[in-house]
Image (spheres, rainbow, N blue to C red):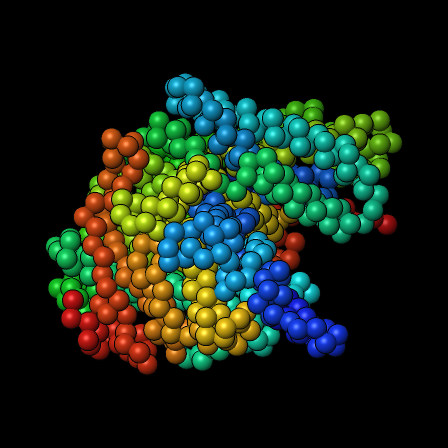
Amino acid sequence: MQATTTLLIDGLVYASYLFIVSVGLTIVFGVMKILNIAHGGFYAWGAYAAAYSIGVAAHFGLPDWIGFIMIGLSSLCVGFIFGFLIERLILRRLYHHEEVIVLLATFGLFLVLEDLILLVFGVNPYFAYQPMVYLGSVEMGGISRDVYSLSLIILACVVAFVCWYILSLTKWGKILATVIYDREISLAIGINVTTIYVWTFIFGATLGALGGAYIAPTISVAPGISIDVIVLSFAVVVIGGMGSIPGALIGAAMVGMLRAFAVHQFPELELFVVFAVMAIVLMIRPEGLFAPVKARRI
Amino acid sequence: MKKGIFRSGALTLALGAFIGAPIVTTSAFAEETFKVAVVSFLTGPAAGPFGEPGRHGAELLIDAINDGTMPAPYDSVGFGGVQIEGIFVDESGGNAKQVAEYRNLIEKQNVDAVIGYISSGSCMAIAPVAEELQTLTIMSVCGTPRLFEGNDWQYTFRTQAHAVADSVAAALYIRDQLGDVKSYTGINQNYAWGQDSWKFFDIAMQKLTPGSSGSDSPQFPKIFAGQYGTEISTLLLEDADLVHSSFWDGDIEAFVLQASVRGFFDKKRFISVAGASAVDNLGKRFPEGTVVGTRGEYGILVREQEGELNEWFIDTYRERYGVYPLESSYQYAQTVLALKAAMDKAAAESGGTPNEDQIIAAMKGLEFQSLAGNVSLALGNGHQAVHPIGYGITAWDEESNSPKLVDIRIYPTHCILPPVNQMSEAWLEAAMPGADC
């Protein structure tokens, strides 16, 4: 029982982490049809911005809870600045090109964002543990748990709810659905697709940055942290179906739970299970579990 | 194959013969530089804790030796009378990129020798290419014993003892200092270094502390994974008293941060084979009472050790870079010292600037004084270094407001490494014959 409880909590925490870092990727693909590899760069910049600002706050003796405000502000700043600039200056010029060209452009942007990190922050690691230490630990299932990691579950629920609310219950969501369905018809009926695209990209970038900013207190923020994240995010999004938020949720839950099971029972299979699930899903349902239905053009 | 100094030397001789002028080869070579590529992680998660400090260690010594400002016995100017030009190269990007980069260094940039390499994966990939291109290559940090066991490399050397020494010294320290360990488990990265470290530690523990039992499900997360919540839960659920880890780079720092909030270090004894960089980087966040090794007489282990070379290195390094030299700073500096010792020896024997064959002959079986101890290339047919390895327990020094190690024990080479011509694993399985420690 103790082991099962621990496994479930571990799986949920990891699934929440995966969902937070991959949901922005799936939203951008769903609306804009862009496989955005630069998403990893937003994650890294979010982590660095949060770690740096939390470090500055600690340096000036501000209370540890200020770190949570820094995490929010860092995500918003990174998302707005990079999201806006990249969409306006680069991606907008590529929408009429093939998807593979845009994919290569985002890969190039990912490398540029990585190098910018080296230029601005250097190679030495940054630590921003104050928010994690501030929340402390709690006894669950017979072992101690850090509350900060548990709060990832709440954050994932909030992100999922906000996405669902915006897409399902607001006018903005209906407009998005129209753009997703057909960009040309959306233009024809007077929807400002250009504005939709820029805000969608900013929203996706902010979610990527939020993933990095929220994880920053638990890791050594160092160059290269985004590489594994982008690989895992792709696995989750591919499993769930590219462009599907429920798909990202289910994909993250599957990978999180199976990985936790592997670590507890068969540690040597830890890495294998993530990609085994992806391979099996691709064999059975190449479009992913929850891929949005596509209209057939005639 | 192009060789900078060697090719230049031959050209000078040929031109000298052609114009009939008398040539003093030493002075002709002295105007040349010996190009050495220094490879370490300059980007990626290992850059901060390992790559940059390693580069700084090599850079500092190359400059000091070129200027002749090092203390004795390295106070002569240059390397066998020649100035070294260091080219600093990034180790990131995987083995295929490293092999391509290595070829580029030798074939296009006319590098005379290559030193460095942190990852065991890099070392295993580079050694065969070094043989193919017949270029002197000295590994600085990587730990897998497979590099020389089963391979007879001519051009490849390693100035760092391999993982067996780290693992046996760890087991000896546990036996001598902790004593009461009944069971143990491990968390190690899932590649050659992590797998080897755990395997050798497990065998050494079985032989040295027969009353203890090892876990049958140690953790092997992917290198640079960053998130260890599930692994920490599993380790906490295990009955093991002690957890062994060969984590290095940002992984040890992330693990310590995540585990310390969960009270992990209050419940388990933890031994870190190569995590000393995290002790300095995390400061007070690194838990006191942790057993930490530095893979040799390096870094925090010898910070208080007296000795002209060590004190000079610490002072000069701090003056130039503003921080204490870490484990990898010493490891890279040690490689530069080996090169200096070999080139000086070869120069003395040849009576002028040595060629590559003479330097390699001088390297084989070389014994030299390092910054805080002595090193001997006694294994691997004179290509693999042996040296003492020590461990200590972390504590906070209120006076200097910095971390330190206490209860330090340093184990001599015959206690931790097999004799010549014996395979490490067989030696360990046979209960380490000859190591009466």
Q: Going by the image, does B11 lie left or right of B401?
A: right
Q: Going by the image, does B139 lie left or right of B9?
A: left
Number of numbered discs overlaid on the protein picture: 0
Rendered residue at 45%/22% (across/down): A57
Rendered residue at 32%/30% (across/down): A136
Q: Position of residue A180 (x, y in %)?
A: 74, 38
Q: Position of residue A278 (x, y in %)?
A: 55, 57
Quadrant of image for the C terminus of chain B: bottom left
Q: Position of residue A143 (x, y in %)?
A: 26, 42
Q: Position of residue B59 (x, y in %)?
A: 51, 50
- B123 up-or-down from A20: above or below: below
The answer to whether residue B246 shows anywhere in this view is no
Rendered residue at 26%/47% (across/down): B306
Quadrant of image for the N terminus of chain B: bottom right
Quadrant of res B255: top left
- A187 up-or-down from B13: above or below: above
Front-most of residues B110 and A118:
B110
The answer to whether residue B410 shows anywhere in this view is yes
Front-most of residues A266 and B141:
B141
Q: Going by the image, does B384 lie left or right of B172?
A: right
- B93 up-or-down from B343: above or below: above
Rendered residue at 61%/43% (across/down): A114
